[in-house]
Amino acid sequence: MEVEGSSKKMIATQAEMVEAKVPIPYRDQCAHLLIPLNKCRQAELYLPWKCETERHSYEKCEYELVMERMLKMQKIREQEAKLKGPISLIPNTANAS
């Protein structure tokens, strides 16, 4: 499944996410990494020093998504700034003779 505006593809299907009881806010392009992480957490009783590799890969994926969104927003802002042109510090009424 392709997500519009993102370079990452959805790997986990809706059915897999429902079966794994992934909360709706977490059903993004990194959900395929969250499913095994949650299974590992449950198996290891949520001990913080367990499941480190799964957690790292999930957090890295989320970080990459955030950085991608930030870069896209920065490009949008730059395009809008180009369209508006330079900001005049002198109001138009001051230039009227």
Image (cartoon, grey):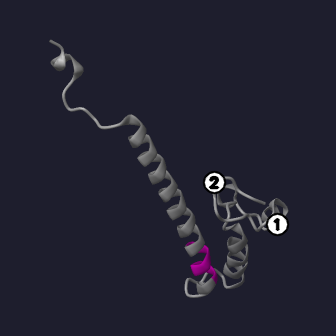
Q: Quadrant of the N terminus?
A: bottom right
- In the rendered image of this protein, does residue 34 appear above or below residue 71? below
Q: Amino acid at mark 1?
A: Glu
**Residue 9 place in picture, x, y as percent:** 71, 64
**Residue 94 place in picture, x, y as percent:** 16, 19
Does dot 2 land on a helix, a strand or a loop? Answer: loop
Q: Nearer the viewer, residue 4 or 53?
A: 4
Chain-order first, disc 2 or disc 1: 2
Q: Is residue 38 left or right of residue 85?
A: right
Q: Is residue 20 left or right of residue 8?
A: right
Residue 61's image quarter?
bottom right
> Is disc 2 surrounded by few (<14), some (14 to 19) or many (20+) residues within 10 Å?
few
> Is disc 1 surrounded by few (<14), some (14 to 19) or many (20+) residues within 10 Å?
some
Which region of the structure is painted magenta? 54-59
Q: Nearer the viewer, residue 43 or 53?
A: 53
**Residue 76 place in picture, x, y as percent:** 48, 47
Question: Of circles 2 and 1, which is in front?
Answer: 2
Which residue extends farthest front?
A: 97
Q: Please name the residue shown 42% across and 48% down the image.
A: 78
**In the image, is residue 82 part of the stretch drawn in magenta?**
no
Q: Which mark is residue 5?
A: 2
**Residue 57 place in picture, x, y as percent:** 61, 79
Q: Please name the residue shown 55% across and 87% down the image.
A: 49
Does dot 1 land on a helix, a strand or a loop? Answer: helix
**In the image, is residue 57 part of the stretch drawn in magenta?**
yes
Q: Amino acid at mark 2?
A: Gly
Q: Is residue 21 left or right of residue 5?
A: right
- In the rendered image of this protein, does residue 81 appear above or below residue 45? above
Q: Which mark is residue 16?
A: 1
Residue 11's image quarter?
bottom right
Q: Nearer the viewer, residue 60 or 72?
A: 72
Q: Please name the residue shown 61% across and 85% down the image.
A: 53
